[in-house]
Amino acid sequence: MTCGSARFSSCSGVRTSSSCVATQGYSSGRTFSCSSACGPQPGRCCITAAPYRGISCYRGLASGFGSRSVCGGVRAGSSGRSFGYRSGGLCGLSAPSITTVSVNESLLVPLNLEMDPNAQGVKQKEKEQIKILNNKFAAFIDKVRFLEQQNKLLQTKWQFYQNRKCCDSNLEPLFSGYIETLRREAERVEADSGRLASELNHVQEVLEGYKKKYEEEVTLRTTAENEFVRIKQEVNGVYVRKGDLEANAHSLVEEISFLKSLYEEEIRVLQAHISDTSVIVKMDNSRELNMDSILAEIKAHYDDIASRSRAEAESWYRGKYEEIKATVVRHGETLRRTKEEINELNRMIQRLTTEINNAKSQNSKLEAAVSQAEQQGEVALTDARRKLAGLEEALQKAKQDMARLLREYQEVLSSKLGLDIEIATYRRLLEGEEQRLCDGISSVNICVSNSQGGVVCGDLSTTRTCTIKSRGVGICGSSYKKC
């Protein structure tokens, strides 16, 4: 028995001599074959127990079945994987053997369809954006049409009022200016409609970039809002402190202005009082009171205080502004890094989701293929068992027919041997009588002839040979001799 990769084959042999010929079933696919053979030995009597010959095959990608009965070592084969089984008659009984089943690894490789899983979502978003832009463009067109209708209405009114005879009035320049204004508005709207049409094409071109930015902004909206609330609280505190400082500075400026006006008023009053009163006082004092220098010193002093306060306030506000600006830059950089990390995680999630979906689909396909293969295997095994039972039944019937024919043959052979013996006896009697007449009385020979034939009976595992003997006796004269 020869196997390609893995197969079942059944072989049974019957012999009437010392030699046994077993058929060989081989295949390279998933095939069931059954073969029975009988091998004779030259010079002996051979009766074949395989008068039936049939072939039945299922050819395909998965499995096939074949049955063949031959005489004399004929091979029955098919293509594909096969399973092998062998049972011998007179040659002996061998145990069933099941070899490994090989699987084509190329069937497990997934198809590379090169399809983008996000293509449908991107197309849907593009359709939504185009729909929004088309709605805006339709709104602009409706506005243009409405303004054109208004223009026509105004022109109709204008023609009506022009054709209408009435007293002269000064309203014509007013209406002319209004109409000219509306005409310019209509022309502007028409120009805007053309410009908007060109801008629509431009917007459609840059829509992809804005869409990506929009997705990023939507993803980071919550984080940005929280950061904005915190920064807003800090800015509110800064604005409160700034308002307090500005109020303080304003109050100081008002106080300085008040004191300045007060000092000027006091000086004016003192000067008036001095001009009204004429007193001559003679004092031995070389010092003189210089009010202008005193006022200048006071004014310089308060100007210095105001300038220092202003400089301190400006420096404080500037430092606070720089601090807030650095904080904003730092938080902006953190926000950008966070956006990049979130985008990377989203891409990783999408890729893993796509791989999981592909693995699930491939797993479902493999499970369906396995279940289908199991069903096909069950059907194939059932059909093979049915065919094997039919072949065994046909083989048994052929054996019975062979035994019956062999018995009939032995009976005919016995009759023929008896007739041959009688013919030989009569010939010898005639020859002896002639010889006796010629030479006188001689010895009579008695010959016993034996003939032997073999009959194959029983099933394949218990085949045995039964011997049938026949004997003929010839008498020649009064004495005999055994031949």
Image (tube, rainbow, N blue to C red):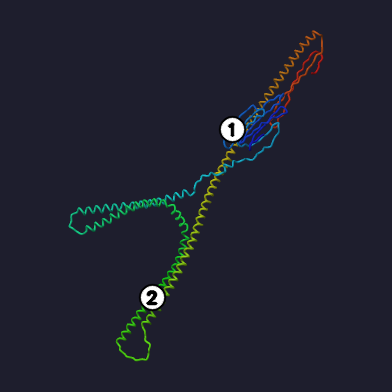
Of the numbered discs 2 and 1, the one sitting upstream in the chain is 1
Front-lying residue, 131 or 312: 312
Identify the image quadrant of the N terminus: top right
Horizontal placement of 437 versus 78: left or right?
Answer: right
Residue 468 appears in which quarter of the rendering?
top right
Say if 52 sits above or below 30 in the image.
above
Front-lying residue, 377 or 426: 377
- The percent coordinates of residue 167 (x first, y second) are 17, 57
Say if 7 sits above or below 228 in the image.
above
Q: What amino acid type should be assigned to the residue bearing mark 2?
A: Val
- The percent coordinates of residue 87 (x first, y second) are 68, 34
Q: CA distance from mark 2 to mark 1?
A: 115 Å
Residue 93 appears in which quarter of the rendering?
top right
Disc on res. 253:
2
Horizontal placement of 77 versus 337: left or right?
Answer: right
Disc on res. 25:
none
Q: Of circles 2 and 1, which is in front?
A: 2
Disc on res. 57:
1
Q: Residue at x 19, y 59 (%)?
A: 169
Residue 247 appears in which quarter of the rendering?
bottom left
